[in-house]
Amino acid sequence: PLHVRRKSGGLLAMDFPATPPEAAPLPDGFAEMFGFTPIWEGCSCFDLFAVAPDEATIRRLDPEEAAVAALGARGVIVTARADADTKADVVSRFFAPQSGVPEDPVTGSAHCAIGPYWARELGIETVRCYQASPRGGSVHVTPEADRAVLVGSAVTVLRGELVA
């Protein structure tokens, strides 16, 4: 079950299954494709997961779509600790061209892995995350047992009407 509830200030709280990453080697050629050597590497149940040395590395990523698509995972999560002047604990990007999404602006499912990883690493209860895509967006993640509660705002990208 995925539950969403409204919070004050127009925020939404989404209760998702947590998907913490486990240590595992990344595919050969990953460092060349993304332009950095990960300081930690692994995978969640869906995605490859790489920790970069710093926020600047995350912000300058520009991997070749076809090469990322050939990696064989649903997507690639890249993350790092945020700089001291960033209003977040961590930053990330999410690439999934093999799933039809070259780069997702703000990815709920990726934060189900990012939040548990960084909560453990930083020893904090709630992780303030910033997804540094061209559009960008903030998500606060609180891991709770096997769940991850994501709090943030939503951007409407489509309105429609279903007729049965």
Image (cartoon, rainbow, N blue to C red):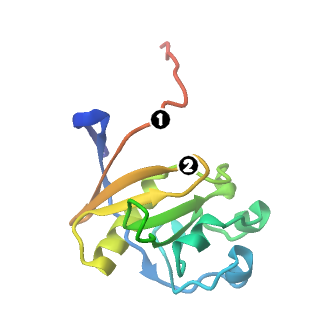
| Amino acid type, label 1 | Val
Give the camera-side residue of 109 and 34.
Answer: 34
User: Is the residue 74 above or below the residue 8 in the image?
Assistant: below
Does dot 2 land on a helix, a strand or a loop? loop
Give left or right: position of 18 versus 159.
left
Percent across and percent down for residue 97 are 69, 56
Give left or right: position of 53 versus 140.
right
Percent across and percent down for residue 83 are 45, 71
Does dot 1 land on a helix, a strand or a loop? loop
Q: Which residue is mark 1?
A: 155
Give left or right: position of 125 versus 129.
left
Mark 1 and mark 2 residues within 8 Å of each other at the beta carbon: yes
Q: Which residue is mark 2?
A: 105
Q: Residues within 10 Å of mark 2 (few under 14, many from 20)?
A: some
Give left or right: position of 133 versus 91.
right
| Amino acid type, label 2 | Pro
| Residue at x-position 71% and y-position 64% | 62
